[in-house]
Amino acid sequence: QSALTQPASVSGSPGQSITISCIGISSDVGGYNYVSWYQQHPGKAPRLLIYDVSNWPSGVSNRFSGSKSANTASLTISGLRAEDEALYYCSSYTDSSSVVFGGGTKLTVL
Amino acid sequence: QVQLVESGGDLVKPGGSLRLSCVASGFTFSDYYMSWIRQAPGKGLEWVSYISSSGSTTVYADSVKGRFTISRDNAKSELYLQMSSLRVEDTAVYYCAKFLNFAHDYWGQGTLVTVSS
């Protein structure tokens, strides 16, 4: 159950787009379309942004989009806003019926 | 609206035990899988365990297998995590979350467990 690999940090200016990668293996990200993404502001609980690779829960802006290719999932945030500055985590179901999270990526809006 | 409220976090000595609770409201609790996820201070998220809607299926992370037990009471809309043989590295905020399509769509505010002598 090794953690999925995410970059420690990314940054972008307001209005720009950024992409956060999430690298797994064939027994997790590559094997299932059960990748989800979460946003966490300091001192708050995580919030679901994307589920099943690319689906939005009710109330989540379509500025957030997800995709997957082979063992790598990606979260793209378009039209960056100051309030997007937060930690972002990916997660996947695995073939041992467990769940694994990525290490987290800190997004800085310049 | 969906609400999840955890309780039971405390300071406990290594080797000790603790039971966390999570009270759910705003949805039909008995229809959904539920999960526990933890976050050590300044660290990332770590999935701990999930339980099926009926309670018949439970899955654990290797790091807690044999020491933690997840359970639920559907009549009370409550989720539990019994933790034993606690270690310093179990220190974390523990979140309960509603589990849908292998994603965690609603989270509680968390309860802090500190394991220290």
Image: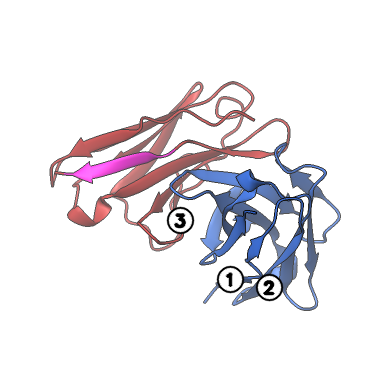
Chain colours: A red, B blue
Asked if badges 1 and 2 are on one and the same chain, I answer: yes
| Kind of residue sitting beneath label 2 | Thr
**Disc 3 packing (10 Å; few <14; some 14–19; many ≥20):** many
- Where disc 1 sits, the SS reads strand
**Type of amino acid under label 3:** Pro
What percent of the width, then of the height, locates residue B8?
66, 70
Residue B29 lies in the magenta-colored region? no
- Residue visible at 70% across and 49% down in the picture: B49
Disc 1 and disc 3: Cα gap in Å?
13 Å
The region drawn magenta spans: A104-109
**Residue A105 counted in the magenta span:** yes
Question: Around disc 2, counting alpha carbons within 10 Å, would you say few (fewer than 14), some (14 to 19), or many (20 or more)?
Answer: few
Q: Which mark is residue A46?
A: 3
Image coordinates of residue A67 in percent, x first then y, are: 41, 34
Q: Nearer the viewer, mark 2 or mark 3?
A: 3
Q: Which residue is mark 1?
A: B4
Q: Distance of mark 1 from mark 2, alpha carbons?
A: 12 Å
**Is A102 situated left or right of B81 in this image?**
left
Circle 1/circle 3 CB separation < 8 Å: no
Q: Amino acid at mark 1?
A: Leu
Q: Which chain contains the residue that carries disc 2?
A: B
For the C terminus of chain A, the quadrant is top left
B21 is higher (above) or lower (below) than A27 = below
Q: Dot 1 falls on which chain?
A: B
Q: Is residue B11 visible?
A: yes
Residue at figure coordinates x 41%, y 62% from the top left: A44
Q: Nearer the viewer, residue B50 or B1?
A: B50
* Residue nearer the viewer, B36 or B93: B93
Main SS type for the magenta part?
A: strand
Q: Secondary structure at mark 2?
A: loop
* Viewer-nearest residue: B104 or B67: B67
At x 57% / y 22%, what residue is drawn?
A25
